[in-house]
Structures are given as structure tokens and as C-alpha cells.
């Protein structure tokens, strides 16, 4: 498997990189106060809307202000795309490492609805005392890493689930607070 020290180092570097990108995105968004709108969108790979924001002064200020609430998700999406582009999945695990690639292929053949998949995640969390890592969720639900992570992040955004880190491994753990 993967060395714990390497995983912790990668996690730490990824968290620092994430914090830097998030901070930089907010600073670039603040340039809208000086008439330079959309810089944060360019920085996070959203070139078409970056041009639109630039030409319309951030959709006349409304889009620029609204982006304050969307920047965190914008950064997450950009980083996920970047990891995939260089061949890494969730938590900096190489996509071709062991079964990860095979598990990701299952998402296109899964006949379950989105609600059924969410119920499967909740049932898996219940079997693990309300706490679930992405890897545990993949093993329990037989869905792919990307799909599981997307569903868990969606649940976290809707505040049904809290994201924490395991104190021993540093892995992201999703805590289903109602279980």
C-alpha cells in the first residue's frame, strides 16, 4: 500500500497549496474593487466566464459579489481537474494504482439513481459509526472514487455531513452527524 509518511507529506503539501490558491483567489476577487473583475476566474481556469466578468465589470458587480460565496467550490473543482490531468485521483492517489482505475470505471455502469447512491453512502456510514472515508465508501458502495467524493462533498455542502481529518492518518473523514 502507500507509506503513511509519504501520505502525510502529500496531504500537508496539498493543504498548503489549497490554502494558497484559496487566499490568492480571494485576493484576485478583491481586485474587482479597483475595476479589474474576473481575475479570480482566470486563475481557476474559468476563462470564458473570466472574459465575461472582465468585459461586464463582474456582471455589473452582482457576479463579482456572488463569487465570494462560490470561490471555495471553484478552487476545489480546479484542483480536482488539475489532479486528474496529471494522473492523480482523490487524496493524491495515482489513478493507475492497483484497483483505483477499475473502481472508477464502475460509475458509468451503475444503474442506481443518485438518491439510491446517497442512501448506500448513509448505510455505509451507519456501519462505520457515522464516519466514512472515501476509500471505505468506495469499498462499501462499489461506486468509483470520483463519484463517491462528489456525492460526499455535495452532502458536506448541504451540511448533512461534516468534513474532518483523521488524527492518525490525516485522511479526510466525512462525519454523518445525524447517525
Image: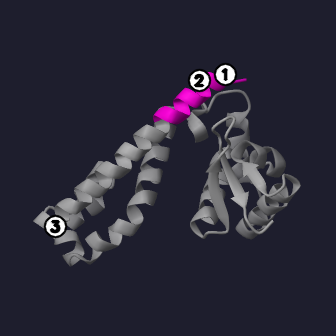
Where is mark 3, residue-wise? 33
Quarter holding the N terminus is: top right
Q: Which residue is mark 2?
A: 6
What residue is rendered at 77% in x and 69% in y?
A: 178
Q: Secondary structure at mark 2?
A: helix
Q: Earlier in the sequence, mark 3 or mark 1?
A: 1
Within 10 angstroms of label 1, few (less than 14), some, or many (20 or more) residues? few
What is the count of numbered marks?
A: 3
Near mark 3 (Cα within 10 A), the count class, few <14, some 14-19 or many ≥20, is: few
**How far from the left and from the top, in percent, is residue 137?**
76, 49
Where residue 104 appears, as percent x and y from the top left, is 68, 43
Residue, x 81% and y 52% (percent of image)? 141
Q: Could you tell me if the residues under marks 1 and 2 are in contact, i.e. CB atoms within 8 Å?
A: yes
As drawn, the residue found furthest toward the left would be 34
Q: What residue is rendered at 48% in x and 41% in y?
A: 15
Q: What is the spatial separation of the Cα atoms under label 1 and label 2, in whole angstroms? A: 5 Å
Q: Is residue 89 visible?
A: no
Prevailing secondary structure of the magenta residues: helix
Q: Between marks 2 and 3, how big is the CA–CA gap? A: 42 Å
**Is label 3 in contact with label 1 (beta carbons under 8 Å)?**
no
Q: Are marks 2 and 3 in contact (CB under 8 Å)?
A: no
Looking at the image, the residue that sits furthest to the right is 127
Q: CA distance from mark 3 to mark 1?
A: 46 Å
Q: What residue is drawn where x is 66% and y is 25%?
A: 4
Name the image quarter holding the C terminus.
bottom right
Secondary structure of the residue carrying numbered label 1: loop
Secondary structure of residue under mark 3: helix
- Residue 5 position by quadrant: top right
The residue at which mark 1 appears reads as 3
* Numbered range of the magenta stretch: 1-13
Amino acid at each position: 500500500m502507500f507509506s503513511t509518511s509519504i501520505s502525510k507529506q502529500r496531504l500537508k503539501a496539498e493543504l498548503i497549496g489549497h490554502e494558497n490558491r484559496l487566499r490568492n483567489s480571494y485576493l484576485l476577487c478583491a481586485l474587482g474593487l479597483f475595476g479589474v473583475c474576473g481575475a479570480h476566474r482566470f486563475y481557476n481556469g474559468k476563462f470564458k466566464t473570466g472574459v465575461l466578468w472582465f468585459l461586464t465589470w463582474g456582471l455589473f458587480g452582482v457576479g463579482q459579489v456572488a463569487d465570494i460565496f462560490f470561490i471555495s467550490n471553484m478552487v476545489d473543482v480546479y484542483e480536482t481537474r488539475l489532479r486528474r490531468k496529471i494522473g492523480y485521483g482523490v487524496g493524491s492517489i495515482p489513478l493507475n494504482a492497483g484497483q483505483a482505475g477499475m473502481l472508477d470505471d464502475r460509475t458509468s455502469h451503475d444503474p442506481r439513481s443518485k438518491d439510491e447512491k446517497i442512501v448506500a453512502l448513509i448505510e455505509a456510514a451507519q456501519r462505520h459509526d457515522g464516519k466514512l472515508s472515501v476509500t471505505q465508501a468506495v469499498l462499501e458502495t462499489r461506486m468509483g472514487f470520483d463519484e463517491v467524493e462528489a456525492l460526499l462533498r455535495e452532502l458536506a455542502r448541504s451540511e448533512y455531513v461534516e468534513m474532518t481529518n483523521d488524527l492518525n492518518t490525516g485522511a479526510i473523514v466525512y462525519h454523518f452527524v445525524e447517525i
